[in-house]
Amino acid sequence: MRHSLTRRCCQWLRPLVSQFGVYFFFAVVIGLGLLLSIIVLYSGKQVNAVIQPLVNESVPILRTISELKTKVTERQVIMNQYFAYGLNQAQFKKKYRENQIRLSLLVQQSDPKRHQHPRHIAIMALNDNAQLLAERLEQVMSSNPVDADEARAILVESAIDTNELLLQLDRSFVDVSQEIETASRRSLYDVSVMIKLVLAYSLAIVVIAILVAYYIHARQRAEKKLAHAARHDRLTDLLNRRVFEADIAALGDTPYAVILIAIDRFQRVQGGLGYEAGDELLVAVTARLQPIIQQFGGVLYRFESSYFAALLDLSGEERPPELLAKELHDALQVGILIAGHELFLTLSMGGAIYPQDGGDAVTLIRNMDAALEQAQQQGGNALRYYDQEMNARAIERLALEADLRYAIERNQLQLYFQPQAHIHSLQIIGVECLIRWHHLGKLVSPIEFIPLAEESGLIIPMGEWILRTACQQAKAWQDAGTPLIVAINISVRQFQHPHFLSLVRQVLQTTAVDPAWIELEITESVVMQDADHTIELLQQLRDLGVMLSIDDFGTGYSSLSYLRRFPINKLKIDQSFVGNLVSGNQDAAIVDAIVRLGHNLGLTVIAEGVETEAHLAVLAQLHCDEIQGYYFSRPLPLAELTRFLSSQIA
């Protein structure tokens, strides 16, 4: 119960403290002080209300009662002395009168509020009777002769009344004393309450002081954490990009090497194993890289994603960045166990020199990134230094990408067609569609803009334009009575796009082309990614009536168990096996194996890159079915292809 109450109090206080901070505690202190002042003032008034009557009334009453007892006793003594002839009549009268005057004054000083009290009435009656007895005694004692017996009887009666009067006065004394004691106890209680309140307030002040100290300490810790978080990466605890930029700004004229480091194929690891595994991998890589960079006297920073940066002073001991790159490479030769998988990683690095390649962080990062991009384009696992041509190429690529975005609407794209022929009759059986781009008055090679389109995502609208245009041309040939198989290359991103199947279905419907004359070429590496899903998608494409072929066969890593399940029609031998094809060499053996494999699976086999008659002869000897290449025809625009087809028919 006590713990739950404390927890509820903390839950109630926490939002107040978080909202108002230390001012909340100050308000509590002031509020408690005001409350205590009010309570003390009220209690003081109560104590005063009790003590004042004691001082003004009760204590004087005790004093009066004591004096009354004295005077009553004195009166009895005076009467006894008078009887015993200790006093003469004149002396008796004088002393008796003085005694009575004092008794009257004392009675008048008594509290009027007590005059109606039965004991007070009894006392007054006894006193009056005592006075009458004194007067009778004087009469008896002044007679001649003196009646001693009657005088003695009067004294006895007076003594009895005096004793009773003293008894009543004692009782009154006790009553008043009890009243004083009761009032004192009540006053003491009120005073003790005030003391306890003061002590409680003092304790509250101590507690609040402790809480304020804790709050200030917690605030300081929070500020330190925020300051640390502002300078460090949350995941790896490395200094972040903001600190890197500040450190670069603080450099003088001393030369430094700055290196941008990226983990190769990190996205594949993250996509396959998940973001948590990716974070775990980054922490593990940091643990391996940081000690090495510190040994070189450098500082390691974490940028975003899988990017790091290193800053090395080049003015000291001769330990070139190339040696650092080698040691970093060696550090990752041992696998890293992540989520039950042993991963072997490589690093791509782009380097720049301060201040030679940039005097500020923005310029250095841009130049490092250009060098890193070149290292990645060359396969990764390397260190490349920045040169000015890199930025020029990067700017050129950006401009090319910007122009490529308008290529379709500006009608700058054009399809070229390379004929495909039967190997024995050399009769044209189909064409492969190849894209060309008219840019600034010249044709841009697909080698330049296709990778750019893949990287930027422009390959999706471009691929749709190729598919639609190719199907329209195939329909035109069908309507003219000269149908040809039209082979269309499908890119990786197209094939993996979630709406690719619906796009093919929609294009076939809108162009009304006979799908039996449409052949979709998909590279070997693409079909082996998520093979089970690929088989399902290929079957759905086959259900649309189109033909399917695997392009660049032999360059990937096809599994024969999957290959026999693919609903394909054709294998295309990659031109890398045809370029040096000579009877009996290794390329010939590979081509022979591919042809036999294709035929055993019931597939047509076509070879691309056929450029010489010798190529044709070996392929014919190996029983290849179809050929494509410059020996037969180069890629042609539609007008030239039409003339070429006419000449073949003639």
Image (cartoon, rainbow, N blue to C red):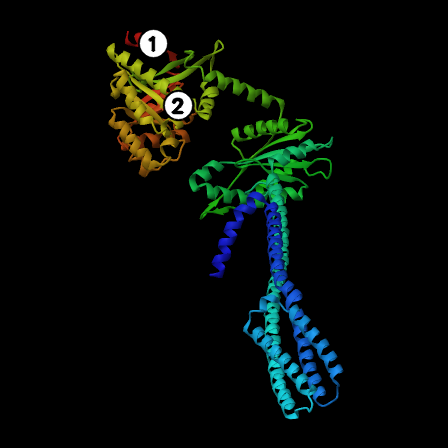
Q: Name the residue rendered at 62%, 31% in the picture.
A: 351
Cβ atoms under marks 1 and 2 closer than 8 Å? no
Q: Name the residue rendered at 32%, 29% in the picture.
A: 595
Q: Position of residue 348 (x, y in %)?
A: 55, 34
Q: Position of residue 535 (x, y in %)?
A: 30, 34
- Tag 1: amino acid: Phe
- Tag 2: amino acid: Ile
Q: Earlier in the sequence, mark 1 or mark 2?
A: 2
Residue pointed to by mark 1:
644
Image quadrant assignment for residue 109? bottom right
Residue pointed to by mark 2:
460
Front residue of 11/438: it is: 11
Q: Mark on residue 116?
A: none
SS of the residue under disc 2: helix
Residue 132 seen in the current view: yes
What distance separates the C-alpha of mark 1 from that of mark 2?
Answer: 31 Å
Q: Position of residue 262 (x, y in %)?
A: 55, 35
Quarter placement of the C terminus: top left
Front residue of 443/202: it is: 202
